[in-house]
Amino acid sequence: MSQAETESRLSVQSGRRGSSDASTSLRDLLDDGSDYRFRALIQDLFGLSARLERVREQFAAMAGVSGPQYSMMIAIARLAGDGGGVTVGELARHLHVSGTFATAESKKLEAVGYLARVANPADRRSVLLRLTAAGRALMDDLLPVVRAVNDELFRGMGRGEFEIVSREVAALVESCGDALLVAESYRRKRERGHER
């Protein structure tokens, strides 16, 4: 968004919600009691998430896999490096998904030949996931496209901004997990209240 668009959005102060009916009680996120900019940030984050999902789907389509499977392949390549592999639990935690989901999707990648399961020498009860030669070749083939997209996505971002965004987004991912638990708790309470 241009500076003029930002200023235009922020200049529409009249008629905005005050702190008594703001969508957050965190004062540092309010401007003179108004949650207008906070709500704009939330909406921008939804927009960013949706667009990133669409970008991932484009990469996945080129790879011939689903979006989550593409993310798994990228994560396995990153986490396993040149080592022996990554456990399903490590992969699930990294991707913020359940172990059950990670297991099911990794089995699909194994079935198409992009992923291999090998015995975990540190724990006989688990396996390590690693990309096969075909999986690594596919990731290498897509790398120029990924690089071009990432360069466009982050154009104009300097090192300082990168450090701040990296730190703040990681913190938001963590607090979002907690926020989801709060939302689910309230939803269950409301559902129980409507059952009476």
Image (cartoon, rainbow, N blue to C red):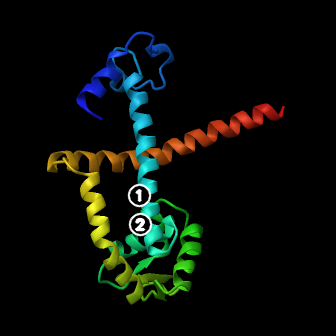
> The C terminus lies in which quarter of the figure?
top right
Circle 2 sits in a helix, a strand or a loop, which is it?
Answer: helix
Splitting the image into 4 quarters, where does residue 54 fall? bottom left
Circles 1 and 2 in contact, beta carbons < 8 Å: yes
User: Residue at 15% of width from left, 50% of height from top?
Assistant: 159
> The N terminus lies in which quarter of the figure?
top left
Tag 2 residue: 59
Amino acid type at image mark 1: Val
User: Residue at 45% of width from left, 26% of height from top?
Assistant: 24
User: How far apart are the alpha carbons under marks 1 and 2?
Assistant: 7 Å
Residue 115: image location, x then y, percent: 47, 83
Q: Relative to 26, is 129 above or below?
A: below
Number of labelled discs? Answer: 2
In the rendered structure, find residue 133 and report the number of the disc placed on it. Answer: none
Tag 1 residue: 55
Camera-nearest residue between 30 and 182: 30
User: Residue at 20% of width from left, 45% of height from top?
Assistant: 161
Circle 1 sits in a helix, a strand or a loop, which is it?
Answer: helix
Camera-nearest residue between 68 and 126: 68
Residue 68: image location, x then y, percent: 50, 65
Amino acid type at image mark 2: Phe
In this view of the protein, can residue 181 be seen by the observer? yes
- Within 10 Å of the Cα at label 2, are there few (<14), some (14-19), or many (20+) other Cα atoms? many
